[in-house]
């Protein structure tokens, strides 16, 4: 997310612009006009914004999958976070 210096959100914060709530959902998606099935992007969402983000992507005909967010489980194509220090495995 783009913001002012020193205002970066926590790694588990909702991806909706301006939201600072903790993420409870993972929204995996890709743009099929640009990327093949191996390239998947992930947004995080709080309870309030999960449907908004899913609908935003689906309205553009992007493949979208929503799953509960667990920072110890890897998103497609990405390593899981280390539960001890929060870094990549």
Image (spheres, helix red, strand yellow):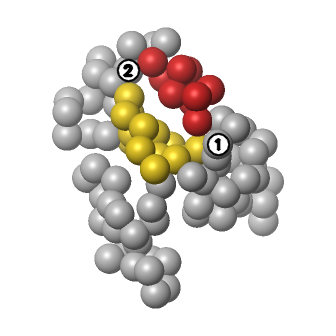
Q: Quadrant of residue 72?
A: bottom left
Residue 44 image offset from top left, x and y in percent: 54, 47
With 34 as the anchor, is 64 left or right in this view? right
Mark 2 lies on residue: 62
Residue ID at (59%, 60%)? 12
Residue ID at (49%, 78%)? 86
Label 1 vs 2, first from the N-terminus:
1
Mark 1 lies on residue: 47
Q: In whole angstroms, how far apart are the C-alphas of marks 1 and 2?
A: 21 Å
Q: Residues within 10 Å of mark 1 (few under 14, many from 20)?
A: few
Report the front residue among 18 and 22: 22
Give the number of the mark in front: 1 or 2.
1
Q: Quadrant of residue 4?
A: bottom right
- Name the image quarter holding the C terminus: bottom left
Question: Can you tell which mark lies on residue 67?
Answer: none
Instruction: State the SS at label 2.
Output: loop
Residue 10 image offset from top left, x and y in percent: 66, 64
Residue 5 image offset from top left, x and y in percent: 77, 60
Residue 57 visible here: yes
Note whether 22 is above or below 54 in the view shown.
Answer: below
With 75 as the anchor, is 12 left or right in this view? right
Residue 29 image offset from top left, x and y in percent: 38, 33
Note whether 63 is above or below 50 in the view shown.
Answer: above
């Amino acid at each position: 997310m783009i913001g002012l210096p020193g205002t970066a959100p926590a790694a588990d914060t909702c991806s909706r612009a301006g939201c600072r709530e903790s993420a409870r959902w993972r929204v995996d998606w890709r743009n099929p006009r640009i990327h093949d099935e191996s390239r998947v992007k992930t947004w995080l969402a709080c309870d309030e914004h999960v449907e908004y983000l899913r609908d935003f992507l689906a309205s553009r005909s992007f493949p979208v999958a929503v799953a509960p967010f667990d920072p110890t489980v890897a998103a497609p194509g990405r390593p899981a976070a280390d539960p001890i220090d929060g870094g990549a495995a």
